[in-house]
Amino acid sequence: MNSLQLALIAWRNLWRNPRRTLLTLCAITFGVFLAVLLTALNDRNFSDMIDVAARLGGGHVVIQHPEYIDTPNLTRTVSGTTALRAAAQADPDVSHAVDRISGQAMMSTASHNAGVMFIAYDPDNEDDTTLSFLEGITAGGLLPGGGANDKSVVLGHKLADNLHVELGDKVVYTLMDRSGEIVGGMARVGGLVGTGADSLDGGLALLPIARVREVLGYGPDEATQVALFLSDSRRSGEVAQRLHADLPPTASALTWDTVQPDLSGFIAMKVGGAVFMELVIMVLVAASIFNTLFVSVMERMREFGIMRAIGYSPRQIFGLVMWESLWLAIVGLVAGIALTAGPYWYLAKNGIDVSAAYGDEALDIAGVGFSPILNVGIFPDHAVIIGLVAMAATLTAGLYPAWRAGRVVPVDAIKLL
Amino acid sequence: MSVWKLAWRSIWRNARRTLVTVAAMAFALWVMVLYSGIVEGYLMSMERDVLDFEVGELQVAHPAYRDDPSLYNLLEDSDAAIAALEAAGFRVAPRLIGGGLAAHGPQSAGVMLRGIDVARDGATLRVSERLAVGNWLDPSDPKGVVLGRRLARTLGATPGAELVVLSQGTDGAMANDLYTVRGVLGTVADATDRTAIFMVEQAFRDLMVVPTATHMLILQGPVGSTLDEARASASALLPGAEVRTWRQLMPIVAQMLDGTKALIFFVFFIVYLAIGILVLNAMLMAVFERIREFGVLKAIGASPGLVLSMILAETALQLALAISIGLLLAIPAGVYMSTVGLNLAGLSGTSVVGLSLPPRWIASFSPASVAGPVVILVIMVAMAVIYPALKAALIRPVQAMRTH
């Protein structure tokens, strides 16, 4: 008796009680469906969030002065950024590398003032794929090719309202240079930006990097950060490690989750919660499978006794029941995938709009705007893990019933009626 | 023999199946009770953060202040307003607010200065309880200030550090002065953590040249009044000012609190769906094993109603057992979660919709947070058992007795 025949008998056994088998399959299918959608929702939304956060700030990997992370101020700079960018661009995972100067300043007019966070970037080298604020620009913008002569600034639209300025008006920004001296720069409002997040709309200024270098007395190759953008945020760790080895001691390469521990903490918490929920469902589904398999084994004790009497080994009977649970796992998985495909495809294309639950305003989590449209997109390795876990749970649930079946004592079992 | 006695004996004829079914239900209930307690605790701490640490129940400001929070949009006659509100049973904390730049050595940061009436603020809000190091404000030390957590980090300032604050006063001239850091707060809320400098009222008035009036009054309503009642009575007392509730001031937080409550029920439903399938399967098996028996029962005169009530009684007994076990086991875990809680120190500083997560997540249980998971479990199980129960009740005796 080979295992192929066992597999065939197991398959036939399953369909001797189609209703029970179908119900068990329902449980597996439901578990797979839920796990796939939940994981896909998280995978997609958190990698989107990480990308948004990267485009809001320092990229997926940032090269900066080693002390900048603890005391972010304008004295902690990296120099030789052109060479650093060239070296980073040579890495196959890096898609963009840009210089940034970011910090705090006071923005004032003759009668009003406000504290702002400013980001100075190179308008010739960046667009909204690296700095997401640029897609929120509602009027004007910084001039490409202006260099150090471009004395314009883009303000958050609420900030502009609070300062009572319009396009073309003059503002003064005051900041502290590397020697602790207060320096000021004059600028004209060249554009307005709206992000949907109140704290940014009321406190963000974008400046041309060449001009800020001049105001702060930086060299032409000096910046507070070199921001790197990757095609896949999950490679951030490797890329940072590779780059870090070749950096001078005055620079360090950090991943987004080191720079934004609050965002990575939030994501870790959400993913932890989802994994916990999936495990709870898995235990319940496994309990359901165990229940059916066990009852079906107990019903057939006489049958197993006869099989032993005509020469089947305990191992073969154990194998028979394990085959039954394997069939359940396979069919359950296939059905799960078939059932998930439709909703998955729909959600991947259209998403669900949860703005009804949160209102019209943009949600911000850890300072990062969060889209109210939830899309799905599972990482392939996560899909494989779900499949393997579903298989393993089903087979584990089958172990004890299979062991009981294999241990049958022929004479006692045949006496049963 | 009564239906209950019969049912009790029947469920123990296949003890292992009953145990697995009961254990699964009890486990699901246990998880859901704890889950709803944890979520409720989170929502309560979020609401408490808004009410006691950041916004207050109501805020009063000049009608133009919300759209244009400038130094000049002052609430005139604030002393009279405070007196009237306090006479009506409100707790009132006036606040002066202005932007500026603060510097400590080579570090500088944009800041929001908050001038507070120390005694009134302490009676209205509990910000001082969140002090991480150093001391809270003291009116006898007008040059002493307290910083938000992230701001202190950005500036590299600790208690005792000297701080230069630069701004522009109402007279249009450059305002600057030297202060000493008295204390640094722990996490409160995003805006406070990143930008707040708390100073005593007089220090703010001197720096920014605001001799009288104030920018905002933070109110806690009279004891026993609802938010809307409090708002109505405050509006009546202050005809020239705008009174807003925290729900209007932080609509996203308010929506999120409501939305999350709805979300819990969704999670109950999903988890119990797995339980529903399990119960359906278990009860179907229980019915089909005994199909001959039911046939005989009916042949000797049992009504469909009797058979139906037997199956329902069997389910009800298992359910009751599961609920007792689940709730009993939830007691020690619930006590642990509501006293020690989940340690979230690793997430310190993470903010959701502008509110910081607490360092320790303490669960909170109310009759509603326990009843929710129980009631939904009962409903889901009742739905799952309809089909097996009807199947048994509608058996045709002759056919049933032929089955093996």
Image (cartoon, rainbow, N blue to C red):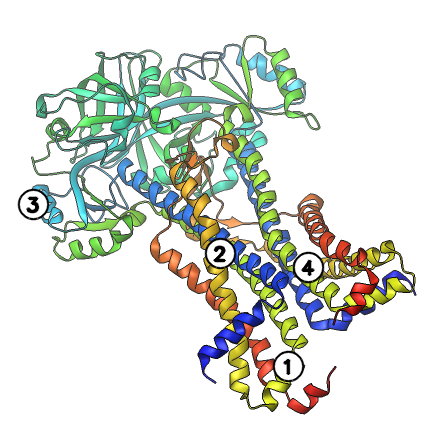
CA separation in Å, label 3 and label 2: 54 Å
Tag in front: 1 or 3: 1
Name which residue type carries label 4.
Gly
- Which residue lies at the image location 25% right of the left edge and 28% below the top edge? A134
CA separation in Å, label 1 and label 4: 38 Å
- Which residue lies at the image location 19% right of the left edge and 33% below the top edge? A180
Name which residue type carries label 3.
Ala
CA separation in Å, label 1 and label 3: 77 Å
The kind of secondary structure element at disc 2 is helix
Chain letter of the residue beneath label 2 in the structure image: A
Task: Measuring from the top left, give residue A387's x and y in whole percent.
Answer: 43, 61
The kind of secondary structure element at disc 1 is helix
Residue that carries the numbered disc 4 in the rendered image: B326
Residue that carries the numbered disc 3 in the rendered image: A83
Decide: is A75 above or below B168. below
Q: Are marks 1 and 4 on the same chain?
A: no
Label 2 crowd (10 A; few <14 / some 14-19 / many >=20): some
Chain letter of the residue beneath label 1 in the structure image: A
Decide: is A360 above or below B66. below
Residue that carries the numbered disc 2 in the rendered image: A335
Q: Which mark is residue A303?
A: 1
Name which residue type carries label 1.
Glu
In the image, farthest residue toward the top: B240
Name which residue type carries label 2.
Ala
Q: Give the left or right position of residue B378, taking residue A253 as reference.
A: right
Task: Measuring from the top left, give residue B21's x and y in whole percent.
Answer: 67, 64
Chain letter of the residue beneath label 4 in the structure image: B
